[in-house]
Image (cartoon, coloured by chain):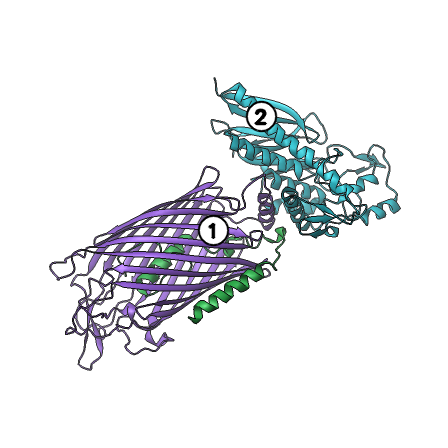
Amino acid sequence: MRIIRLTVSALIALAALSSCTQVRPWERGYLAKEEMAWDRDVLERQLNDHIFFSKEASSGGNSAAGGGCGCN
Amino acid sequence: MKTKHSRSLIALSTSALALPGIAHADAPPTESTLSYKISNYQEDDLTRAQVPFGELGRYDIDVHQFQYVSPLGRDFALFIDANHEDMSGASPWFSTANAAGEPVINMSGASGITDARSELSIGTRYYSQNGNFGGAVGYSEENDYRATYVNLSGSRNFNNDLTTVTLGFSHSADDIFPTDAELFNRVRNEDKRATSAAVSLSQVINRVTTFQTALSITEQSGYLSDPYKLQDARPDNKTQIALSNSLRYFFIEADGALQANYRYYRDDFGISSHTLDLSWFQNINRTFQIAPVLRYYSQSAAEFYTNIDDFTKPLTEPQSSDYRLSAFGAFSGGINLIADFGDWTTTFTAERYVANEKYSVYAVNQPSPALVQFVRLSLGVDYSF
Amino acid sequence: MPYSLRHFSFKAMGSPCELQFYDDSRIQARKRARELILESQRLERKYSRYLEDSFLSQINRSAGASAGISIDEETRKLFDHAETCYHLSDGLFDVTAGILRNAWNFRLPQLPDPARLSDLLALIGFDKLRWQHETLYLAAGMEVDFGGIVKEYAADAVTRLARELGIEHGLVNLGGDFSVIGSKPDSSPWPVGIANPRQPEAMMARINLRDGGLASSGDYERSFVLDGKRYSHILNPKTGWPSSGLRAVSVAANLCTVAGSFATIAMLREEQSALAWLEDSGLPYVYMDSSEEIKGPALQAAAPG
């Protein structure tokens, strides 16, 4: 499927990119800020995942599906 | 760490922690955190045009979420999550055609439903020089549903911690025992299983940019239909995949961060979807932050979706008028207001969601009359000690 | 065997050091203390400027060599931390600035020869270091000195080792740089004394340390007065002249290494800039300013925590 092929090429490109980037230790301050985290507010993300799982057909993405509920 | 520190302190702590004599690169939390969030979720009433007879009100849900995170020894952390929901309201029971041949909804029950759900999960994570590994077990229970689940995940850092690969796995075993089963001739007791695996790759692009791509696959089997709908029969297995890409970019002069996520989903019920999330996190000063959020969602219809139930069709054939399997699009907008007082942080969130077949990028052959609109308000508190 | 407080005094990093920790066996305490003392001595043997066969001296002897010198992970991370300090201090904290002491002789009240000073300044600059993967190429005449980092790092490394050995309540003191292994058994903090730069025997302040580290930087010795003006030994690596800022500063942070970096950078800045730097860190600190007054938010925190 085209999407799978796109992902694989994106992953390969990223792996190649990774040898090029150089972030000096003193520059990592911005990356450590909480607003740059993948999950700044865990409870908010869990709540949103739960609501959208109950009200829409889609789920998953960046983690293996979590718990269960009778809402879908 | 959920506290706001000076940039110099963050930079010096980061490079000090990299020293081999001091700590692992992947460090467990240094302090304990207790978080609580209370939310109210309220769906808009339907109109009399949509529901010729009966209740117009839909769901009204109060949610309480608790989380406790604490370091455990030198290399471990403990995670305890507990949720409780109280819900009342009504949901679509079946769909018929009115005199003009348009679909109209009949809502469940005369007085509506009340239900309560409680969930508890306990997990632990081990942190090492190059990554981490952990898992959790959980249990949830409501009047008509029980679920037990387990999940495991591990991360590995490469390339001077600029690259991270994560693998995750989860399995859930659910038990369904609908209320008033005999009265309404519903299934008495069914079960459902779901197994899921996910892989993700995160990469630091430069000092202000990070990117993540992730793929997850889930297989569900068992009773997948909605027992409360009169004419709902779905296949007894479903395979779904989701691919998501996320970006975080920090604007130094503006002192704000852009978060963008895009997810593509597809399953073998015939549903595909696109989800786009955009969020801007703006620092106002050391104490106050504001973060508006915008989300666009659109899905296609399931192959067996119909917006008017056909009661002559045998239930051995897949069919459903559940609006969640129809083609539609949805916009939601929200705002987060955060106040950080060091050990205490409070967050207020307000969100408005509107689903409409006109917002769909997919072809809509049978629009559902029961698309949902809701408002959600939340107030959260975090305490570190 | 009673669970009681044990003391071990020793010399490392060219300073008097002390370990205090609770243990219920005298023999076990001695064994643990020996491990901890060995770890501090390992770091001294590796990074001391005064030991001819230290790794630091080998690095300095490699100056000008075309093959460069291969650097291990620990040293590489020390250079990384030094680089963070270099950038955050706008170049004032520079581990290549040690050679300036060749122009200044603090035993005699004598100003340096300007020509000599400018020759040395040409050989100073962290950004002049050249790296090829894990090999360092040090230009001829340049020198590296990890003063301001290593003693504080040693305090943190000894603390981590102490915890791994099973010590729960203790305090590490390496020549005035402190790190808490764990608060006292009754959860009370460790009182630590900060030396007064004006009166060596007196204390500038007494701080209660519950956890984390406390590091100090100051003008305790090696200064002279000429024509009514004081010349401290804390030299600005860009001008070659002493910085005229605070007399002494002590900072408390989660890690002694971090506290030490904040304190040292504060000492290198001019007084106003130093105070703004300390204020912005969000950390507790105490200082003695140029008019010899002792101030700082850590003074108000007389109560534990």
- The chain holding disc 1 is B
User: Against B202, is B233 above or below?
Assistant: below
Chain the render paints purple: B
Q: Which mark is residue C33?
A: 2
Q: Which quadrant of the view contains residue C46?
A: top right
Residue that badge 1 annotates? B155
Residues flagged by tags 1 and 2 on a common chain: no
Image-based side of B213 in relation to C91, left or right: left
Q: Colour of chain A?
A: green
- The chain holding disc 2 is C
Hey, which residue is sitting farthest bottom in the picture? B100
Image-based side of B114 in relation to C231, left or right: left
Closer-to-camera residue (B44/B167): B167
Instruction: Residue at 47%, 63% (x, y): give it.
Output: B245
Identify which amino acid the numbered label 2 is placed on. Ala
Instruction: Residue at 20%, 81% (x, y): give it.
Output: B101
Image-based side of B188 in relation to C135, left or right: left
> Closer to the observer: label 1 or label 2?
1
Q: Which mark is residue C14?
A: none
Q: Secondary structure at mark 2?
A: helix
Q: Colour of chain C?
A: cyan
